[in-house]
Image (cartoon, rainbow, N blue to C red):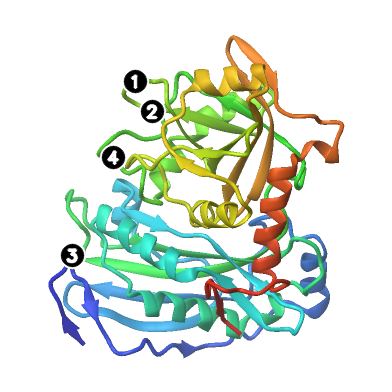
């Protein structure tokens, strides 16, 4: 192992991680696993194993292993519990018709994981090792990947990194744990591809310039929960946030990037501002939409443009994108002073033609039903 100087503290270059495999003695029975896969929900059940790897300032990354899924043992003084020094990612493993299992653009998740690590003063996980950790877990727990043709099901993969050093000093931790867990997944929203309602928050801010909005860290999500509760109280599924400075520009939803379809076929999404999470699905939609003949714009869009566009008919569809939610149509915008319906809910369950086209194009690619000319798929098993 050799240490190198880089943007991330303690970044290390190592030989390929070698995972010690410790199989659990009491894996789920075939009957129990079948019951979970028949109705997986989202993030409710977990596979038999998990990946763990440790990092210290003295040794760098070491002791990588696949081990039985179990509670973690951390000190009550662990930095993650007091100063929220942690990050995570989310991606899916898809079963193809030939039985193979593939991930969608995991190298992009790995790159974002590195950027998040840099922002939270955590060590870097090299891209190849990030992917090798996914492959190690999926290889052991492949039976948990739902079968091809079982609907929009997959194995959701959750890599994460937490600061485990027991120290109450406010400083970057010298001991860190990296892990990957996996959960069979169905649609994120109970409604499936049907339109969801969005609450436009005028009181809560998701992220600020210079903050952690572009990093995928738990603190961003914790700060969104009060606004989500407000949305739920107003009959909405998710929240849309405004920028922190002028309080007029649309940023993103709590867990999804937003897209606006105009009557002339243009598709607009808020430009990355440093406080918007750069979604893997977002980046993919930009390219796929262009392939389908749409002019795609990344620019600022105001709340007034959204509302006025719905009223005038200039904005014909709105949808959100994310790994968990895939492509989710938005059928209603609500805020303190008003409420607007988007699109024709009497046609195709309220899913507009542009949204439906992009959604099916993306899913067909992820599940291996169409060619992959860009090489976006990586085989895991």
Q: In screen coordinates, is 224 left or right of 151?
A: left
Label 2 residue SS? loop
Q: CA distance from mark 1 to mark 2?
A: 6 Å
Q: CA distance from mark 4 to mark 2?
A: 12 Å
Q: CA distance from mark 2 to mark 3?
A: 30 Å
Q: Is residue 278 above or below residue 149?
A: above
Measured from the top left, where is residue 278 in percent x and y? 42, 50
Q: CA distance from mark 4 to mark 1?
A: 16 Å
Q: Quadrant of the C terminus?
A: bottom right
Measured from the top left, where is residue 119 in percent x and y? 26, 53
Label 3 residue SS? loop
Q: Are marks 3 and 4 in contact (CB under 8 Å)?
A: no
Q: In screen coordinates, is 14 left or right of 195?
A: left
Q: Earlier in the sequence, mark 2 or mark 3?
A: 3
Graded by Cα atoms within 10 Å as few (under 14), some (14 to 19) or many (20 or more), the crowding at tag 4 reads: few
The residue at which mark 2 appears reads as 243
Label 4 residue SS? loop
Q: Earlier in the sequence, mark 3 or mark 1?
A: 3
Q: Are marks 2 and 3 in contact (CB under 8 Å)?
A: no
Find residue 211 and name its label: 4
The residue at which mark 3 appears reads as 9
Measured from the top left, where is residue 347 in percent x and y? 85, 36
Label 1 residue SS? loop
Graded by Cα atoms within 10 Å as few (under 14), some (14 to 19) or many (20 or more), the crowding at tag 3 reads: some
Q: Work out whether residue 85 can be spotted.
A: yes
């Amino acid at each position: 192992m050799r240490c190198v100087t880089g943007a991330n503290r303690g970044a290390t270059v190592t030989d390929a991680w070698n995972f010690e495999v410790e199989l659990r003695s009491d894996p789920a029975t075939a009957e129990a696993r079948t019951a979970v896969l028949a109705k997986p929900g989202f993030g409710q059940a977990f596979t038999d194993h998990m990946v763990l790897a440790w990092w210290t300032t003295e040794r760098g990354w070491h002791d990588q292993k696949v081990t039985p899924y179990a509670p973690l043992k951390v000190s009550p003084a662990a930095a993650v519990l007091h100063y929220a020094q942690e990050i995570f990612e989310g991606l899916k493993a898809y079963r193809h018709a030939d039985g193979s299992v593939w991930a969608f653009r995991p190298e992009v998740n790995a790159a974002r994981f590195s950027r998040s690590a840099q922002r939270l003063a955590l060590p870097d996980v090299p891209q190849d090792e990030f992917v090798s950790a996914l492959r190690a877990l999926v290889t052991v727990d492949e039976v948990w990947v739902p079968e091809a043709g079982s609907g929009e099901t997959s194995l959701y993969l959750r890599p994460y990194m937490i600061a485990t050093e027991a120290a109450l000093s406010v400083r970057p931790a010298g001991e860190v744990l990296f892990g990957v867990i996996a959960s069979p997944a169905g649609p994120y929203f109970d409604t499936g591809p049907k339109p969801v309602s969005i609450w436009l928050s005028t009181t809560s801010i998701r992220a600020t310039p210079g903050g952690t909005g572009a990093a995928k860290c738990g603190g961003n999500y914790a700060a969104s929960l009060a606004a989500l509760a407000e949305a739920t109280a107003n009959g909405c599924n998710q929240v849309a946030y405004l920028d922190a400075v002028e309080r007029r520009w649309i940023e993103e939803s709590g867990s999804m990037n937003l897209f606006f379809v105009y009557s002339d076929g243009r598709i607009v999404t808020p430009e990355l501002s440093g406080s918007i999470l750069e979604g893997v699905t977002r980046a993919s939609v930009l390219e796929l939409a262009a392939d389908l003949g749409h002019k795609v714009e990344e620019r600022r869009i105001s709340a007034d443009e959204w509302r006025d566009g719905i009223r005038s008919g200039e904005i014909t569809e709105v949808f959100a994108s994310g790994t968990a939610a895939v492509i989710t149509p938005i059928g209603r915008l609500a805020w303190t002073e008003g409420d607007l319906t988007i699109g024709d809910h009497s046609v195709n369950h309220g899913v507009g033609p542009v949204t439906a086209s992009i959604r099916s194009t993306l899913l067909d690619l992820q599940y291996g039903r169409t060619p992959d000319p860009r090489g976006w798929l990586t085989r895991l098993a």
